[in-house]
Amino acid sequence: MISLFKEIFYTLCIFLLVVACTPSTSAQRYSNKKQSQSTSQQTKSKKIISKKSINDSQLKDSIPDSLQEFDEAPPQESTIDRKQFIANYKNYINPDVPLGFREEILLQVIKFLDSPYKYGGNTEDGIDCSGFTRQIFLNALNIELPRSAREQFNVGEQIEKEDLSFGDLVFFNTQRRSNPGHVGIYIGDNQFIHASRTLGVTISSLDETYYKKRYVGARRIDTDTEIN
């Protein structure tokens, strides 16, 4: 009888000991599991951030040169009266006479005057430098220029600065990654029209310090030659 009582007593003690220890063990296991999940999430988060950084870097490298035209915003040192420009050049346009090269260019240029600057833009609602020159030649002369300033620099005939004439493309080194990085259309009197980062489509002078320092050359497009 005593032996049976002792056996029951020992069994009860062992049962209480197991019950008392189980919550602590579960709690510890839960804590360890939670800590493991947290560490896993942090590692995953770091991987995502790292991946995002790589993607951002790759995205930046993949942006066409035409979308990265300036290392710095060009200042506007001189003010050219655009209204006077339009008034002067309207005198060249006679509705009774078929339009020539100059008139076709001017009609298209006037449509874009004051259009805002927009990376990758191609319309009057927003346009960049090479998009502007491309649209002018396409709409006025049905000549399709390449999309970027760097590509446009490789078409047509190379022209010396002192030999510039109306309609020549003028180019500027405005970015470190690509030369040239900016393009405009020469309109005479040492002036050119272009899509400026700060002013949109406007008229600037080749004598302005910013553009004079960065001028790299000019090209004349043969209006009788189709460019692919």
Image (spheres, grey):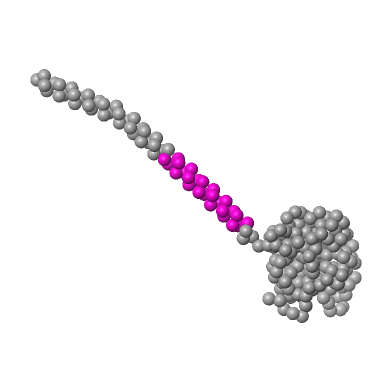
Q: Position of residue 70 (x, y in %)?
A: 73, 57
Where residue 67 sits, quadrant-wise, is: bottom right
Is 102 located above or below residue 64 in the figure? below
Numbered-mark total = 0
Q: Position of residue 117 (x, y in %)?
A: 74, 58
Q: Nearer the viewer, residue 84 or 42?
A: 42
Q: Position of residue 2 (x, y in %)?
A: 11, 19
What main secondary structure does the magenta stretch of the protein show? helix
Residue 51 is covered by the magenta coloring? yes
Left or right: 221, with 228 as reference point? right
Q: Position of residue 118 (x, y in %)?
A: 71, 58
Viewer can see residue 194: no
Left or right: 227, with 28 as reference point? right
Residue occupying the far left of the picture: 1
Q: Nearer the viewer, residue 15 or 49?
A: 49
Viewer can see residue 136: yes
Residue at figure coordinates x 74%, y 79% from the top left:
225
Quadrant where the N terminus is found in the figure: top left
Where residue 143 sits, quadrant-wise, is: bottom right
Residue at figure coordinates x 15%, y 24% from the top left:
7
Is 55 located above or below residue 21 in the figure? below
Residue 116 is covered by the magenta coloring? no
Quadrant where the C terminus is found in the figure: bottom right
Q: What is the magenta range? A: 36-60
Q: Nearer the viewer, residue 81 or 198?
A: 198
Residue at figure coordinates x 85%, y 55% from the top left:
77
Is 30 located above or below residue 151 in the figure? above
Residue at figure coordinates x 52%, y 49% from the top left:
48
Residue occupying the far top of the picture: 2
